[in-house]
Image: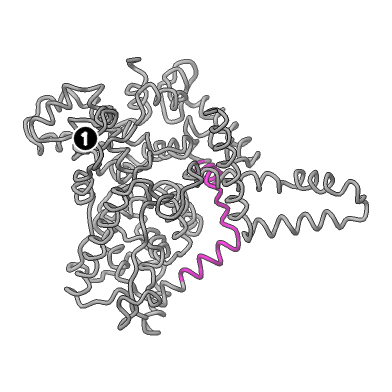
Amino acid sequence: MSALQGQGDQSEHLSVLIAHIVQELRGTVLHSQLKRAAQFQAGKPNIHLSDLKKEVHSALVETGWERKLRNAVYKHMVLYPQMNHPSSSGEHCKEPLSYIRKSQSNWEKRILKSLNSMCTELSVPLARKRPLQEQKELKMKWNELGTDEPDLSAFRPVYAPKDFLDVLMTLKNPNCNSSHENKSMVHTWGLIQMPFKIKTMKELRDQYWELTMTESQTGVDDLSEIAADVYETERTKLGKKVLQAGHSPLAQQFSKKGCPATQRCDLWAQILGVTSDDIDKLYYEQLKSYVFQHDLLVDSLIYKDIKLTATNDDNYFVFEDYLYQALLVFSRDTHVLKHFANSSATPAKSYIRGKLGMEEYAVVYPPNGVIPFHGFSMFVSPLCYVYHDPVRLYFIFRELYMRYFFRLHNISSHPQGIVALSILFESLLQTHQPQLFYHLREIGAQPLRIAFKWIMRAFSGFLASDQLLLLWDRILAYNSLEILPVLAMAIFAFRRVNLMEVTTFSAADAVMADLTGLKLVPLLQVAIFSSQR
């Protein structure tokens, strides 16, 4: 009986997923292009009515349209994993746990209060229309925004990773004490005491088996059987064939061993389903016009964040102009609001002056619904090494954010969310380096206090740029953020000897301050596969 019920649930799940994907594709540019292509083929004089369906389908396959449709369907399947609860709806679909929903709501209110307080203190509006002269000046210096030096001394980040961690540490399941099963899932030495089921090292080995030491990897110099340059040449040849195939899952599988540097831009675009065609370019120009027309408070927060982070980083300061362009445009992009269907978060709203509390006069603020935190610009910075066209750079960043990065600053029970990732880090370190974990805990240097900012920023600004890109290769290839806490655990294990000698938090933090000399792949291989415990 239970087996039949399970089959019924699975069938219902599949039906809902198919209906959802069909609904998402209907009305897209691809949908209209497919219709035109099918109509063109159907209108050919040599096609018989009895063979119409077969002939049109064959023609769509030959002309590459079927492959484009398959990639679009695959993209939506990747983007909407929450569909495994077809009976859920509304907020329960976004986040099934009520106490998590409440915590996220309270956190959003706190962020909005901080933003409104800044408006009041500095006597600046959330948004204002730029005078025509100011619009003209901004257009003229669009490609030299880094030369602009507005006085931002009074502005402060709305929140930083440390503030967010303090909130996560207060999370508590009200039903935890009544369940023995829940008790066994709580990791008692860690900062975050939540009964979330996370993966074991054995499950992670199964997931990342292509990273094993017996498999050659891009970005590793000491390949055992063949010279590194020969291996890279062969990888590049294979990568060319993968790109010619134009199939997203194939590009994803290929990237599990790392992307050749010369092909990374196209492989990532293929995995993410980003095309950057003429319509996208027109849309980007439209978003630029919105930047010219209105000045937002979050613009100053973006400027401030870039000045505090990227422009002080030897790897990224040269990309300052690109970062301003991408993030200012991003703040106006209402397409980003779509990701809230998968997020536990809800976009902040503001009211037109004089209409406070009247919902019909409420507008999402900023237009994309995302209020940047300290370090937010580092989600874009590494992409500047890969994409030199600002339009393509923007759409790749937008897709990365909507697929992965938003999960790193929202409170949720999702297995890819920051809470689960933090618990996974603490669990792995506690299980595989118990002496180190206990020592750091006893001296008041809880490991998560050091590692949290790495995970929340996906290691951007901490690893050397070439190593970071190899890490992000694996995020896309495995469609998972779980590699972030695995790497964090690996770094602690690597610096174990020095950490065991420290006696204060500041000393432990100093030991872990510089990660730029670390090599990503060997670290992960040793951490995951050196011991088969």
Q: x, y (%) of residue 49?
A: 91, 51
Query: Label 1: how many residues lie within 10 Å, few (<14), some (14-19) or many (20+)?
Result: few
Is 172 included in the stretch rendered in magenta?
no
Tell me the residue at 60%/62% (across/down).
Answer: 278
Is the residue 270 above or below the residue 230 in the image? below
Choose between 135 and 224: the one closer to the eye. 135
Amino acid type at image mark 1: Asn
Is the residue 502 above or below the residue 416 in the image? above
Q: x, y (%) of residue 220?
A: 41, 27
Choose between 399 and 166: the one closer to the eye. 166
Which residues are the magenta region?
Answer: 264-288
Name the colouring of the figure: one colour
Give the quadrant of the N terminus.
top right
Is 282 included in the stretch rendered in magenta?
yes
Q: Quadrant of residue 514?
A: top left
Q: Secondary structure at mark 1?
A: helix
- Residue carrying label 1: 177
Q: x, y (%) of residue 367?
A: 40, 67
In the image, taking residue 74 as reference, residue 201 lies left or right, namely: left
In the image, taking residue 463 as reference, residue 239 lies left or right, namely: right
Tell me the residue at 42%/48% (across/down).
Answer: 385
